[in-house]
Amino acid sequence: MNLGRKLLTSLLTVILFSLAASLLSMSETYDFGFYIAVYPIYAAPLIFLIGLPLSIVVDFLVNKIRFTNHVLYLIVKLLSYACAGFVGMYIFYLLMGAGEDILRYRETIILTLFGVLAAMIFVLVDLALEALFKARKKQL
């Protein structure tokens, strides 16, 4: 595991997630500029303090399994990160003191889906950076 790559992945995920979430959230009341200023404020601490440690744990667990098929490895990794995004948002709810409100599915599903979106962006950026760094290492 490369911690520098994970930190870079986290930073790029904050930027890309903020762009994607701003595009999804903009309306007549609040435009893209408002959301692109607000989302990084909320996304950065969650991605760095919850997403990054969960990513390290998921990578550790997935790498323990010996895959002979690379496609199966990618599918398991994507599904593992989706689950981590789901769990990460519930960790956030608990830290914010949601209590019994955490069981209200209609109220938690939207933010939970945003957590899964952030996790999917994270894993795709991480896989891209991993491939980029491996290709660069082969050149040297």
Image: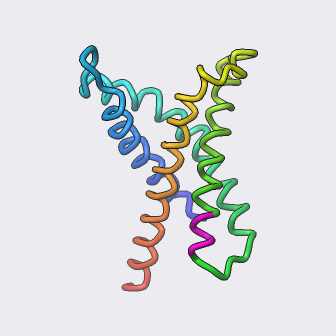
Instruction: Determine the residue positioned at 60% across, 22% down.
Output: 106
Residue 72 among magenta residues: yes
Above or below, comparing residue 74 to residue 125 in the picture: below
- Where, by quadrant of the figure, is residue 77 drawn? bottom right
Residue 92, given in percent of the width and then of the height, sits at 63, 28
Above or below, comparing residue 36 to residue 70 in the picture: above
Instruction: Determine the residue positioned at 65% across, 55% down.
Output: 80
Residue 100, given in percent of the width and then of the height, sits at 75, 15
Q: Which residues are magenta?
A: 71-75
Residue 27, given in percent of the width and then of the height, sits at 28, 22
Above or below, comparing residue 131 to residue 51 in the picture: below
33 sits to left or right of 78: left
Q: Quadrant of the C terminus?
A: bottom left
Question: Which is more toward the observer, 140 or 98?
Answer: 98
Above or below, comparing residue 59 to residue 68 in the picture: above
Residue 20 among magenta residues: no
